[in-house]
Amino acid sequence: MSTPEPPLALLAELTHRCPLQCPYCSNPLALEGVEGELGTEEWCRILDEAAALGAYQVHFSGGEPALRKDLPKLVRHASAAGLYTNLITSGIPLNGEKIDALAGAGLEHVQLSLQDTLPEEADRVAKMPGAHAKKLEIARCVREAGLALTINCVFHRQNLERLDAMIELAVALGAGRLEIAHVQYYGWAIENRQALLPSRDQIEKANALIADAEARLKGVLLFDHVPPDYYARRPKACMGGWGRQFLNISPSGKALPCHAAETIPDLRFDNVRERSLADIWVESDAFRRFRGTGWMPEPCGSCDRREIDWGGCRCQALMLTGDAAQADPVCELSPDHGRILQMVKNEAGQEVPPFRYRRKAN
Amino acid sequence: MARVELNADAVPRFAPHVQFRFDAKRTQWVILAPERLLVPDAIAVEVLRLCDGQASIFTMVAALAETYQATPETLEGDILELLQDLMDQGVLTL
Ligand code: SF4
Ligand code: SF4
């Protein structure tokens, strides 16, 4: 097999700890504890290796990366290594002083999550009173520090009707980008699917509203929107293709091709404590398994979209067909596509059950 | 905030937190922006290398016309369009 192209970005999951408990969190149900977390020196080494390997950007994420006291140090190290630095945060542990320190360390961009535009709804989803107000304050500090700001909101059946209010809020906060995310059904979201899954009607309205806002706000606000999977006819290229663009490091150092990859039972993940990033990228079993198109059975193997969507999401294929190597059943050409239709029919529009919140004991 | 519409007198520059750099490993110019990577084509690279926050679009067009031995009029429309698009994407600012 030929040597793969170098990765574009490193996703550095600094910790699984988080002050919030969003029921759609993409972290695994088995959250890693603080005891196993990589230390500052280990992360510095990984950042150097990622830059040497050819990555352009690092996304510091989690959990809540700002719970790590060494975050400014890691930002400084990454930016000295030549990486473009992004912070993906809930905002909760930050304040004006800490944001100024991060800006001074070379941080370029902050992606701040909001849960809703109604404070009481936002706080209910995050399960923390006052969270929304704190986040608005952090957005202001980010702009005052001169950093680029993206607002990220995960949409679901309980907040989609406030999509237009969120667009207005993003503009008012001085964000340059708005990421309209739809719940991805792995991790905690699977546990809460019925409480989250929107109806087809809600999605169609949202798509029209976004198209309209995008035209109206051209040159003011950039939109990053991936329509939700379950209502699509073809899957999305998960992570831009397995082992092609991203390298995700878990808090304890496991190198994952995607943050949900651990749900696939027979994949062996290397740890950055034992192998260099370059070795892992090129040789590790987990990265090679679904890289390229050689592993694909039909209908993907001979499909003319196989290098466009790379067969879709492996984790979703596993979850819905029991075999991670099958076509993503979101695809209409998949023999299992009917299962998605059936599930959507069964769950969307049913009564909204209470959330199972994301926390260690839950 | 409102959309900025460029004309030939405008003096565009890279927005803060946007980096335009040469990647020696892949031997290509890249634009790094919040969670985004753009790979400009050869013509865009020529234009962007003149984008220093001093030169007006008029000046840039004149310089390129000389390099490519073309008349400024034939280039101006395309260059304005290219820069407007990068402006709309938040890569450039005034
Ligand atoms: S989704 Fe919510 S709970 Fe999960 S890491 Fe992000 S802010 Fe924390
Ligand atoms: S058959 Fe496979 S490659 Fe073709 S569109 Fe469907 S998922 Fe993509």
Image (tube, coloured by chain):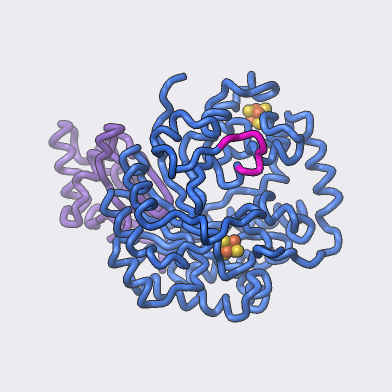
Asked if one can make out residue A207 in the rendered structure from this viewpoint, the answer is no
Chain drawn blue in the picture: A
> Residue A159 or A126: which is nearer the viewer?
A126
Say above or below: A218 vs A232.
below
At 21% from the left and 44% from the top, the residue drawn is: B49
At 41% from the left and 32% from the top, the residue drawn is: A279
Question: Could you tell me which quadrant the C terminus of chain A lies in?
Answer: bottom right
From the viewer's perspective, tell me whether residue A121 is left or right of residue A99.
right
Chain drawn purple in the picture: B
From the viewer's perspective, tell me whether residue A1 is left or right of residue B94.
right
Q: Is residue A264 magenta?
A: yes
Q: Is residue A263 magenta?
A: yes
Q: Where on the picture, by quarter, is residue A310?
A: top right
In the image, which residues are magenta? A262-268
Q: Where on the picture, by quarter, is residue A99?
A: bottom left
At 43% from the left and 53% from the top, the residue drawn is: A59
At 58% from the left and 53% from the top, the residue drawn is: A211
> Residue A359 or B10: which is nearer the viewer?
A359
From the viewer's perspective, tell me whether residue A90 is left or right of residue A69.
right
